[in-house]
């Protein structure tokens, strides 16, 4: 039995009905993810009503629907909760709504506007505003918390108080496909999977540009007094043992609680720039500093950004190419700007 075939229980009457995607090599068309990614989706069955929380990429729709059918009658689903509109979680929805004609869509007004533009349909909806709206499924409740820019402006999170579970969509997620037969961190060999490293890479590429909003969301959760025992994101494992630690780790990444590490990133045509950067690396190492070095002709930019999440200092080296900065270095510097890696001590050498 594998994830490709089966839904998985999270807790009583809560089921993972997501999918693994091993065929996508560039997340958002940009970030190398050779180990794949999961799109998580959840069925919550109350004593009276049933809800689907988020969906999956259209390419995986049939597998997703098959898993939903293992735990409930898809045609009788009452609510579809859309926490976030990016197509990795919504492009299967037009097809889903044909199979679940009675499902009312619950999302934010901005999400509704985006949905109509993306998919040219306007299904019956309940729009969420503020942080107090909730619906009852009978013995389970779904409360909607506005968490904008996690990861787009329309984003919200869904809290299930009876199970102290936060369905946070993109936030607190991780790259890499899920192992077979496991969604809960308590069922996964976290060291083998190195989930924290997968989450840091995901934060580095997807979330660093929104880190101030991560801080705001975590502060809001604290202020609302929401107790979270389980974090159920839309990518990666469900954190049922270390939910509070993951929140704290993401808070650190967002606020810039750095380790004493220097990241060196360079582009070198014939090895002379590399020689210069290697001399600097040797000096820093001999002085007791820790260095992580990336030659952009070989290394992936995303791996350098991932190292930078926990590093306060960056040294950039570039050979001159046609009177310009070496193109791979120029691309990397542009990524630093786009993803807002602005609060570092930076030295630049152009040779
Ligand atoms: Fe996983 Fe912002 O989509």
Image: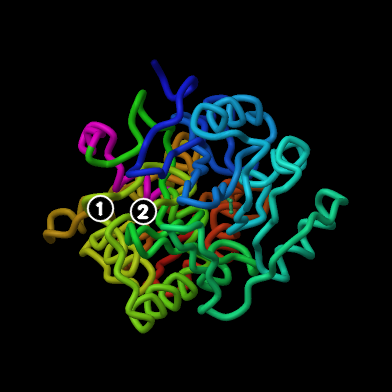
Residue at 44% of width from left, 30% of height from top? 35
Residue at 62% of width from left, 53% of height from top? 79
* Residues packed near mark 1 inside 10 Å, few (<14), some (14 to 19) or many (20 plus): many
The one of 317 and 346 positioned closer to us in this rendering: 346
Q: Is mark 2 within 8 Å of ligand 1?
A: no
Would you place residue 344 above or below residue 189 in this image?
A: below
Provide the major secondary structure of the magenta segment: helix
The one of 278 and 195 positioned closer to us in this rendering: 195
Residue at 23% of width from left, 31% of height from top? 192
Residue at 41% of width from left, 46% of height from top? 174
Which of pointers 1 and 2 lies earlier in the amino acid sequence? 2
Q: Residue furthest bottom?
A: 223
Q: Verify CB contact (< 8 Å) between mark 1 and mark 2.
A: yes
Residue 211 as seen in the image, left or right of residue 252: right
Q: CA distance from mark 1 to mark 2?
A: 7 Å
Residue 188 quadrant: top left
What range is drawn magenta here?
187-201
The one of 269 and 236 positioned closer to us in this rendering: 236
User: Secondary structure under badge 2?
Assistant: strand
User: Secondary structure under badge 1?
Assistant: strand
The one of 144 and 291 positioned closer to us in this rendering: 144
Q: List the residue tagged with mark 2.
A: 264
Residue 141 as seen in the image, left or right of residue 135: left
Would you place residue 122 above or below residue 267 in this image?
A: below
- Examine the structure image and report whether residue 173 is included in the region drawn in magenta: no
Q: Position of residue 118 (x, y in %)?
A: 81, 52
Q: List the residue tagged with mark 1.
A: 291
């Amino acid at each position: 039995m594998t994830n490709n075939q089966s839904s998985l229980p999270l807790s009583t009457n809560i089921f993972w009905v997501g999918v693994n995607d091993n065929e996508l090599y560039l997340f958002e068309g940009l970030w190398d993810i050779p180990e794949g990614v999961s799109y998580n989706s959840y069925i919550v069955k109350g004593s009276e009503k049933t809800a689907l929380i988020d969906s999956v990429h259209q390419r995986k729709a049939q597998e997703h629907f098959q898993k939903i059918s293992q735990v409930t009658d898809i045609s009788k689903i009452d609510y579809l909760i859309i926490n976030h509109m990016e197509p990795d979680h919504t492009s299967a929805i037009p097809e889903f709504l044909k199979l679940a004609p009675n499902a009312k869509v619950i999302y934010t007004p901005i999400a509704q506007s985006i949905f109509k533009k993306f998919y040219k349909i306007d299904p019956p909806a309940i729009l969420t505003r503020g942080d107090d709206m909730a619906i009852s499924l009978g013995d389970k409740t779904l409360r909607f918390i506005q968490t904008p820019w996690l990861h787009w402006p329309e984003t919200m999170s869904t809290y299930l108080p009876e199970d102290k579970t936060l369905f946070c969509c993109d936030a607190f997620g991780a790259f890499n496909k899920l192992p077979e037969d496991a969604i809960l961190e308590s069922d996964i060999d976290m060291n083998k999977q190195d989930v924290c490293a997968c989450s840091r890479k995901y934060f580095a590429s997807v979330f660093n540009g929104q880190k101030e909003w991560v801080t705001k969301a975590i502060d809001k959760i604290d202020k609302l007094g929401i107790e979270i025992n389980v974090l159920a994101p839309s990518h990666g494992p469900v954190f049922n043992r270390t939910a509070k630690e993951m929140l704290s780790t993401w808070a650190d990444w967002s606020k810039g609680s750095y380790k004493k590490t220097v990241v060196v990133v360079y582009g070198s045509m014939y090895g002379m720039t590399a020689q210069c950067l290697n001399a600097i690396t040797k000096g820093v190492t001999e002085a007791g500093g820790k260095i992580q070095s990336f030659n952009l002709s070989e290394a992936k930019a995303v791996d350098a950004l991932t190292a930078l999440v926990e590093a306060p200092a960056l040294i950039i080296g570039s050979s001159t190419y046609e009177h310009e900065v070496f193109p791979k270095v120029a691309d990397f510097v542009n990524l630093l700007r786009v993803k807002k890696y602005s609060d570092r001590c930076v030295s630049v050498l152009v040779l």
